[in-house]
Amino acid sequence: MLVAPTNGFANASTDILLEWGTSIGNTQYELEIASDSAFTSIVESVSVSGSSYTPTLLDNNSTYYWSVKPKNNCGEGDFSEAFSFSTVHFNCTTKESTDTPIAISSSGTPVITSKLIFLEDLPIADINVQLDIEHTFLADLVVSLTSPAGTTVTLVSNSCGDASDINAIFDDDSPAFNCGVNPGIGGSVKPLGTLSSFNGESILGEWTLEVKDNAPSDGGRLVSFALEVCVEGDFRPDADNDGVFDDGDDLCLNTPEGQEVDASGCAIYRFPSENFVITLESETCSDNNDGSLSISPKLALDYQITVSGNGVDLTQNFSNSFNLANLSAGTYTLCITGTDGTVVYQEYCVEVQITEPGPLNVSSKIADDGSLVTLNLSGSSFYTIELNG
């Protein structure tokens, strides 16, 4: 009679759909869910007219037994053979934002955001928000959290009048907040919206906390923001917090906190943004092919440069400077790598343009009385003029 989940099913969600077969003549089905095989500890008992039911009182990391009994106007049958299933493990973690503190300007009506990214594709079972905001007039603020799926829950909205600051954990299971003095909202409190709206969504992606200041004059800052997240399933290990999981993908464990890494979890080193001073000299005359470029690096490294484009294909090593002459007008691509013998820097590429002057052009105009000749010159920055040869 019982159809799904199959007997002994493991890692079930807490909102798993229970299904059974029906027979003609039966109008109701009594369903019992228990935490023991003898059905002495009943968790849920309901009567339904259909062939399925979604439990509402299940806990994670637990084993349950269920059975169904048919009923109609003439009487009732016996409970079916019981099936069992176990719910998925329930794991929790706290993740803090790395982009705080963020100022809330007292000018205008600013909107600020702080973001958190989760890399695991796991369904949410519970979520709380840790929030620390310094602000001199809480009634100006609307604070909300938006999930990667686009669901938005309001935490506070124009609350607590002229009270200052929020230092609280927003939790659906906590009591509604009462406005204090300082902080205006503190402790463990219930948000205005319902954080359980996120339950069942994946944590994967970018979570956004938004703070709207709807009036000028008062300001402050978002000091910190964190999410306490409980999920169905296991978080993959990432001890160095580099976004590459340690159980197979990370080939370079224990990279320093904040270090940029590649897809294998190995450190990426980039040249400073102003490491190279590039000087260009254009052609003196069209088709002279006497343009040039020079590169002076700031870091003392062993460099290799590749120059390509406009008929040039050159690879050369250098340390203190690099010079290339006899260039024709056109576009060139420069790609540079460097190493200090231990660290290899990411390739840096840039396009440069060697130009040429426009055509030489001279026009003249003689004054009406013949006493003055005006020459209009173009195509160069320096001219030699001979009068009467």
Image (cartoon, rainbow, N blue to C red):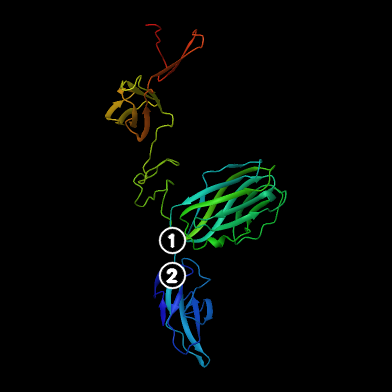
Task: Give percent across and percent down for residue 158.
Answer: 68, 53
In the image shown, does 365 or 138 lie closer to the viewer?
365
**Quadrant of the image containing the N terminus:** bottom left
Compared to residue 150, the image places residue 63 above or below, namely: below
For the question of whether residue 15 can be seen, the reply is: yes
Which of the 4 image quadrants contains residue 63? bottom left
Question: In the displayed image of the protein, which residue is found farthest to the front?
Answer: 368
The residue lying at 43 percent from left, 29 percent from top is: 274
Q: Position of residue 93 (x, y in %)?
A: 49, 54
Residue 234 image offset from top left, x and y in percent: 43, 58
Q: Nearer the viewer, mark 2 or mark 1?
A: 1
Residue at the location (38% across, 39% down)?
268
Amino acid type of the residue tagged 1 in the rendering: Gly
Residue placed most toward the observer, 364 or 110: 364
Q: Quadrant of the C terminus?
A: top left
At label 2, the amino acid type is Ser
Q: Is residue 339 visible?
A: no
Q: Is residue 140 left or right of residue 25?
A: right
Q: How many marks?
A: 2
Label 2 crowd (10 A; few <14 / some 14-19 / many >=20): many
Which residue is nearer to you in this view: 178 or 275? 275
Q: CA distance from mark 2 to mark 1?
A: 13 Å
Q: Which residue is mark 2?
A: 86
Task: Name the residue beneath numbered marker 1.
Answer: 233
